[in-house]
Image: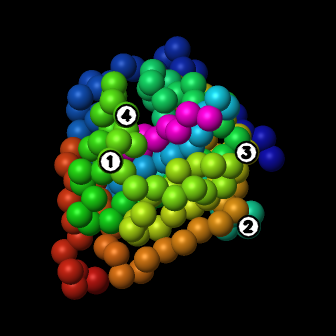
Amino acid sequence: MGYAVLKDEALAQPLDQRAFRDALGRFVTGVTVVTSRSRAGRPCGVTVNSFSSLSLDPPLVLWSLAASSSSHAAFEEASHFVVHVLAEGQEALARQFARSGIDRFAGIETEEGPEGIPMLADVAARFECRTLYRYWGGDHVIFVGRVDGFAQAPERAPLVFHAGAMRRLAAGDRL
């Protein structure tokens, strides 16, 4: 089955980027931290809300990273990564891994995961992945990984992101 571009990109009308970003913000996402280790052995990590499941068989997930990110080169060369789904109360952790120009692991307790990747403690879920594919997607790179292992803490409510802010789910709001 082949896929084709449905509309010539040259004919696409430019969008108001701020309004587009605001519209995307209407979609609630989880907040994750993705960690890895560069070929040189340097730990790297970044806050990501573009994480998604892709396939159950085989078990695949995806996430994207801005090509302009200071962490881009390290993730490009990494063979594995770990996605940490943050829990309520981990807003400071999300902010720390979102900042640039700092040691994002400073003061953070980690355990060693596959390929020596630092893994964060007390998260809502964690996915240990082998990098399968990298695709360019506009100003981002899309990483697809095969899940080799996972863990979850069902009692931990996830941290969520909506309309430009981190939020929590209201207890008992199940429909």
On the image, numbered disc 1 is attached to which residue?
Answer: 107
Q: Residues within 10 Å of mark 1 (few under 14, many from 20)?
A: few
The reply to whether residue 70 is in sight is: yes
Provide residue 148's location: percent of width, then percent of height. Answer: 70, 62
In the image, which is nearer the foreground, mark 3 or mark 4? 4
On the image, numbered disc 4 is attached to which residue?
Answer: 103
Q: Which residue is pictured at 49% across the width and 29% down the height?
A: 71
For label 4, the SS is loop
Q: Earlier in the sequence, mark 2 or mark 1?
A: 2
Provide residue 173's location: percent of width, then percent of height. Answer: 22, 81
Left or right: 99 as drawn, with respect to 114: left
Cα separation between marks 3 and 2: 14 Å
Left or right: 83 as drawn, with respect to 106: right
| Amino acid at the residue labelled 4 | Asp
On the image, numbered disc 3 is attached to which residue?
Answer: 132
Task: Residue 169: name its quadrant.
Answer: bottom left
Q: Is residue 102 above or below residue 127?
A: above
Cα separation between marks 1 and 3: 31 Å
Provide residue 163's location: percent of width, then percent of height. Answer: 21, 48
Q: Which residue is pictured at 37% across the width and 38% down the height?
A: 104
In the image, which is nearer the foreground, mark 1 or mark 3? 1
On the image, numbered disc 2 is attached to which residue?
Answer: 57
> Which residues are drawn in magenta?
41-49
In the image, which is nearer the foreground, mark 2 or mark 1? 1
| Amino acid at the residue labelled 3 | Leu
